[in-house]
Image (tube, rainbow, N blue to C red):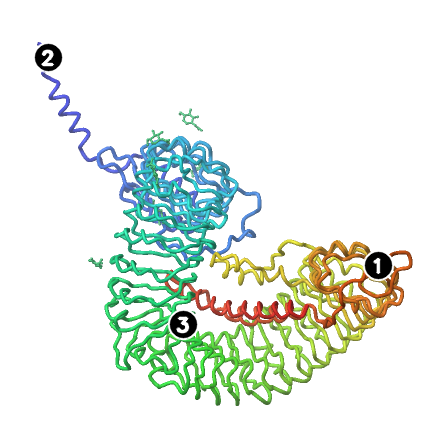
Amino acid sequence: MNPLLLLRPLLSWCLLAILFTPTSGCLPHERAALLAFGAGMNYSLTLRARLSSWGRRAHDDCCSWPGVICHPTTGYVIKLKLRNSNPPPDYPPADDNNASPRQVREINSSLLALTELRYLDLSSHDFRGVLFPQFIGSFRKLRYLNLSFSHFAGGIPPQIENLSRLRYLDLQFALDPHVDTLNWLAQFSSLQHLDLSGLDLALTNVPTTLLGSLKVLRMSECGINSFPISSSVAYNFTSLIVLDLSGNPSLISVLPEGLWNLSSLAHLDLSFCAFRGGIPDAIGGLSSLTYLYLSFNRDLEGSIPGSIARLQRLEELSLGGNLLTGNFPSWIEQLTSLTTLDLSENRLHGFIPESLGKLCNLTELYLHGNSFQGALSKVHLDNLTKLEVLDLSSNSLNISVRKDWIPPFQLEIAGFGSCLLGPSFPPWLQHQTRIILLDLSDNEIAGVLPDWAWNISYFTIEYLELSDNNIQGKLPNFPEHTNLNMLRLAYNLLEGPLPDKLPVELSTLVLDSNYFSDQLPVWPYVCNVSFSNNNFTGAISSSVCQWIMLSFLDLSSNEFSGEIPHCLGESLNVLERLNLDNNLLSGEIPTTIGFLTSLGTLRLSNNGLSGGIPPSLQNCSKLVLLDLSNNKFSGSIPTWMGEKLSSLAFLKLGSNHFSGYIPQQLAHSGKLQMLDLPHNNLSGTIPPNIWNFSAMASTSQVRNEELEYIELELITKGQELYYLSISDLIRSIDLSCNNLVGEIPEGVGHLAGLRNLNLSMNHLNGSIPQQLGRMELLESLDLSNNELSGNIPESLSALHSLSHLNLSYNNLSGRIPFLQQLTSLDDPSIYAGNPGLCGSPISKLCSNTKVNQSGEPHETEVHREGSEWLWIWISIMLGLVMGFWTFCGILFFNKKWRYAYFHIADSLYDRVLLRLELLLAHLRHRN
Ligand SMILES: *[C@@H]1O[C@H](CO)[C@@H](O)[C@H](O)[C@H]1NC(C)=O
Ligand SMILES: *[C@@H]1O[C@H](CO)[C@@H](O)[C@H](O)[C@H]1NC(C)=O
Ligand SMILES: *[C@@H]1O[C@H](CO)[C@@H](O)[C@H](O)[C@H]1NC(C)=O
Ligand SMILES: *[C@@H]1O[C@H](CO)[C@@H](O)[C@H](O)[C@H]1NC(C)=O
Ligand SMILES: *[C@@H]1O[C@H](CO)[C@@H](O)[C@H](O)[C@H]1NC(C)=O
Ligand SMILES: *[C@@H]1O[C@H](CO)[C@@H](O)[C@H](O)[C@H]1NC(C)=O
């Protein structure tokens, strides 16, 4: 017998013993590699902090270092769990000044010594400016790789395709530049979890046959424009449980057929995309669905399919922000596991069935922005013991309960704006002790509020919105400490003096359009204050100078008189917006205004202010909007304006006594898009470089940082409406009613983005430049009451947007060109007072043609203020919305709050848009 055979059991026993004997600590070369990795970590402060305890003692065991996990027997490092568990809510903006521009930083590749690594998590550390680790492809044994939220620079190296054993790959927000290719994914046949959210895949060919093994696929906010799973292979994705494609607004498509073959889906998020068409019945086949989000796809229409009732596991159903029609789905009662139901912002109507009350696990119910009617009663509400969010705003809904009804729930978000809850303050609210946001605006609540109504607001409420009611009485004196952060009481009947003290936490107070009077108290902590249209008289008290946290102040449309307090400039260091329009103020602008270096808007129109523009205003370099119109200002327009006020976008100096030349330097301001100087004594010629305003030259959107954040906030809604850009709308030059002489300078065609050009009532001569025809977006052109001569250029017929034209009272001659777009303004008065003109629509025939008689000329109201409606709109936008969005600090909301908060903002924004639409309708009517 071979003795080796006898030895075999012994040998295997020895082998086993070797394998399972715990080793003492980590391998020296791995320890060295970890130390090198840590030592080189000077670019990510958070990771450096995480590694700070590594290798403190000379010979300690690296397997015991935080985040390092070794194989129990071999001692090899198999896991590095270095996630930053306390990431900041958002990273500070990358500070490019600190890094020398071309220095590219890299993670030390010493880590490669860890050949047995299976698991690597470096997520949530800020790696801005650091290259995506190029060596990553060499960790052949990696099963789990998490580089999420690290914002690496550089591309994904091709070697990544060698990580073919990966099961989990989380690259959400892992790198900032756009991703060239995802072809390497084809090698990852074992992948179960793939997260590419936040990567820029807009230019990337997303392989349509992703991996059949996937359980989780997240591609949220990637800029993709096609559905990543092609319908022909969808049935192969039998294991897919989570599919998240939310936030891809370029994904314009009907809901793809293949979706309904993903039979294991439990979590489907297609919100904030651009899916259109109906929701098919086939959705009822996804029987495992627990979370279904289809909200804010702008054009999803039709009725809500009844087959959803078959989705018995459904816990969250979000269909808000679409165009869905029909009644409240009565079959909802079958979805007894529902905790969140969102049908908001659709076109649903009818009564809310009482069977809603069967959803006893409901915690969040969003119905706002529909046309529901009737009332919610005890039967609806008495079983909803877990309800925390109830948003019924903007429906014709009432809550009809007995006065002594005690709700079974404790709401956190109570949204009842524009409902029918008045006229008394709903008594049942006194039992609600956890409310954070209460919106009762526009409910016809009348009379004096009961004391308890004020008192509940002191418990937990942070946002209290009671505007647009008929609330009477005085404001109470608030306790020093409450949770109240924002209080809005605009458009009520409140009166009397303001309370002496505000809660320390209150940052936003909006009391517009009431009857408050008397003095301004000392409120040292408030940030945003709006009192426009009240009964304040007398001088602006210097107590306002003690509101040292103030960032937004609107005292417009009162009867404040006297001078603007000098101390304002010295003390309100963080003031960003000041509105004193429509008062009786007199005197000069105090020179201390120059201390307000954060000022973004300064509005002093319609007062009796005089003097010149103070030179100290040069220091307000962040000024975006300056409105001094309708005052008695005099002197010249300072030459520094275009140079020092480099952010200036809106300049309104009309109806004053400004004299002298229009400074050439104005054109140096790259952002100016409204130049409004009518009704002054300006003389000289129009500066030849006036057409250099770059912001007006572009026909595309001009980004204006100061305005951008409003838009950003609103874009988050994902609706097209909210992409509407202010900068796009208002591009206007009005120099009318001055003493300008000379010709209209050449080059006017550069301003292709201009909407309104008014040079009327001057002494301009020469001819109308041919180039005018290049201003494709021009809506209103007024050159009347000048001394212009020559022909009307044919090129005007290229101005397709033109809806208002006035060339009257000049010396124009020759044939009137055929202006196709002007059939609506086919009005002889456009050409009146030009004896040399002939042809349609005026009655004088040109000598050598037959002219057929045009239809009856009808009187058109001549409106000279072509841009006025735009101005009204921007006034509302800047005044209201900016004021609303100004916060002293940065507020971080959890999802629920954000939702409701946006909603409040929306109702506000909707009102603004409504006003705009009325104005537009009015304008069209006048045309
Ligand atoms: C990595 O760190 C080691 C030790 O600190 C150093 O010698 C090496 O040059 C570094 N390598 C890179 C690529 O930075
Ligand atoms: C990756 O890390 C982030 C946080 O840093 C975490 O939210 C995410 O769930 C992780 N991904 C995986 C697949 O575990
Ligand atoms: C992947 O690994 C193979 C085998 O080691 C190697 O030949 C190949 O070059 C690697 N691929 C890339 C892209 O580095
Ligand atoms: C379906 O998946 C299997 C394995 O998951 C794969 O072999 C097959 O090629 C896939 N079919 C298609 C059409 O992608
Ligand atoms: C995919 O779903 C459709 C219905 O939605 C069904 O007719 C078809 O048979 C399914 N395909 C496969 C391969 O399961
Ligand atoms: C409500 O939720 C509880 C706990 O979350 C659960 O046990 C119960 O089954 C749910 N009720 C219904 C009707 O789904």
Residue at the disc numbered 1: 851
Q: Is residue 346 above or below residue 35?
A: below
Residue at the disc numbered 2: 3
Q: Amino acid at mark 1?
A: Val
Location of the N terminus by quadrant is top left
Give the spatial CA distance, label 3 vs label 2: 96 Å
Estimate how packed mark 3 is, as few (under 14), some (14 to 19) or many (20 or more) residues with alpha carbons within 10 Å: many
For the residue pair 577 and 13, the one nearer the viewer reads as 577
> At x 29% / y 59%, what residue is drawn?
332
The disc at residue 396 is 3
- Residue 655 relative to residue 720: left or right: right
Give the spatial CA distance, label 2 vs label 1: 125 Å
Estimate how packed mark 1 is, as few (under 14), some (14 to 19) or many (20 or more) residues with alpha carbons within 10 Å: some
User: Residue 864: which quarter of the image?
Assistant: bottom right
The disc, 3 or 2, on the residue closer to the chain's N-terminal end is: 2
- Residue 543 relative to residue 487: left or right: right
SS for dot 1: loop
